[in-house]
Amino acid sequence: MFPTRLDSTVAYDIAKAMMDGFNRHYRLFRTESARAKHRFETMDWHGQQRAQRERIEFYDLRVKECSTRLEREFKAGELAMDVWQQTKLHYIGLLVDHHQPELAETFFNSVTCKILHRSYFQNDFIFVRPAVSTEYIENDEPKTRPTYRAYYPTRASMAEELMRLVTDFDLQCPFVDLARDASLVAQAMVEKIGTATLRANFQIQVLTGLFFRNKGCYVVGKLINGFTEFPFALPLLHAKDGNLEIDAALFGEDDLLLLFSFARAYFMVDMEVPSAYVQFLRSMMARKPRNEIYNALGLAKQGKNLFYRDFLHHLRHSSDKFRIAPGIKGMVMLVFDLPSFPYVFKVIKDYYPPQKDTTREQIKGKYLLVKQHDRVGRMADTLEYSEVGFPRDRFDDELVAEIQKFAPSQLEISDRDGDGTLELILKHVYIERRMIPLNIYLQEAFDAGGANADDTSAVAVRAREQIVRGVVEYGNAIKDLVAANIFPGDMLWKNFGVTRHGKVVFYDYDEIEYITDCRFRKVPAPRNEEDEMSGEIWYSVGPRDVFPETFGPFLLGNPAVREVFMKHHADLLDAEFWQAHKERIAQGHVHDVFPYDRDKRFHQAERP
């Protein structure tokens, strides 16, 4: 049966309504991102944090608005499938000359999947692959706002050109001493170039959108000389007097990867052509997947879409099986992985031991809190999916039995296509970057002789360095979380992971609380000898009471670990440390957490 002319008209109207819904979404998204500049200039840090939280919700709100409109005006859920096929074709036509076609395709998928049954999530009705190229999309805005600007200094004029580069961003704040800062950056750039001859194409390229996050603003670009490119970022911060300073010059892919880490909050950037930004950033960070760059730019749904495409591609080109993830099993989460794929999959269990007084909805709420919070480089971002289908034959039988035992409500196995091929469907799953669990990282060092101070072999020396690095980073991670108003709750080593850059990151969120919601106490002195000898607690404990001095017995049983911890982080066992941070946060102070080492900073003065 061929579609009627009436069907085609309805299909076009639906396509147009969906495009209107996306355009409204991106207009609001971009407006909020652009306002970050004024909030930075006025040092409105709480407003910046609030806007970052609220912007995350924009997408789902617009998808709900659009699907409600389609149901109300077109009874979309009752339409024949050939109308939906026509709708997709009309929508593709509307994407011609669009500046965000890849985002608009993802929006179409989201709305369609909200209306149609899961069995229709296939090529005919959604964009499984992009239909419109994002190559060479031109920005139609005035020439002052191309995707990036180029500057052509000489060695002698480097500082002068850098001053012009920064001034072109038109920040409505004076600098403490821009000439001084430009000279420091110029010196760092000249050192990077070394004695190399400046080629004809020698230039500095910078993205025209500033990158805002927390209390920082970043100029992002690259230095080009011949066939060599040096990625860089310049953090701009407010000095103690409120004026601006260039705080550091970050160079190279590793520095940029840390700046754009999956463990940090999303940037706010005003972008007309987001795909051009992603392409520019990929040229600087070749190891960074496109999905993670979209995430870092605040376009999380596009990041999810690209991740899923990458995942399906990987499944088609691999043959290993999903398995229970190595390490200590969690009481709340069932964790599995695919050895050849650098991510882990986490399913909330149906049943928890008595000491875990929680519910599925409360756990989801904790993960949402982390998604909306400034993760300060210490909490892993998660991708959240519903109704995810996997080939059953790619699952280890032991893993399937584990899911059936601990999370049966989340599992469905069916022959959806009726061809005898079984599909395993998970109702809800979180996906995170795989890291080395910190307890395994430390155990590997112990196994290599790291606890034996008398062993002077190179292997043992490296193992001891690994122990020191892991324990110091663990304490640094907790202190960064405290600065961000986060109490981890369960601070055991197994709940932290080590990234490829050696950073320690927290990833078990079911017990986190805001620091300001906790009550940090010293253990009361025993009232008498009977209290002192008793194995029972003789004092009252409220639901959010925390006794930091009791952390030691759980964390510091190994003498080698204890020695390093007490040398660098003994204050974490003191209630006064936690209480002091709580009071500062309650008074409205927003702490500085730097996405780069402090020794890279030009100016060490405390920030306001």
Image: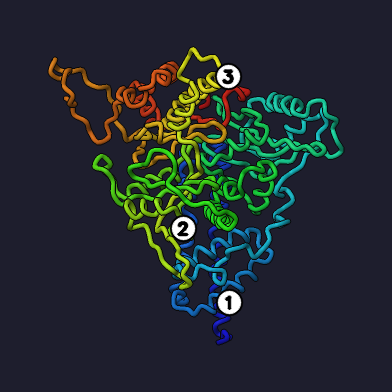
Amino acid type indicated by mark 1? Gln
Name which of mark 1 and mark 3 comes first in the sequence. Answer: 1
Marks 3 and 2 sit apart, C-alpha to C-alpha, by 54 Å
| Residue at 63% in and 26% down | 176
Type of the residue with mark 3: Ala
Judge from the rendering whether residue 233 lies leftward or rightward of residue 485; answer left or right: right
**Structural crowding at the residue carrying mark 3, measured as other residues with C-alpha within 10 Å and reported as few (<14), some (14–19) or many (≥20):** few
Image height of 476 relative to 289, above or below: above
User: Residue 206: image x %, image y %?
Assistant: 71, 41
Which quadrant of the view contains residue 12? Answer: bottom right
- Quadrant housing the N terminus: bottom right
Number of numbered discs present?
3
Q: Are marks 1 and 3 in contact (CB under 8 Å)?
A: no
Which residue bears the numbered disc 3?
458
Q: Residues within 10 Å of mark 2 (few under 14, many from 20)?
A: some
Q: Residue furthest top?
A: 454
The residue that label 1 is drawn on is 86
2 or 1: tag closer to the N-terminus: 2
Q: Residues within 10 Å of mark 1 (few under 14, many from 20)?
A: many
Say whether residue 483 is visible: no
Q: Residue 373, labelled with which disc?
A: none
Query: Please, what secondary structure does the residue beneath circle 1 have?
Result: helix
According to the picture, the residue beneath numbered tag 2 turns out to be 60
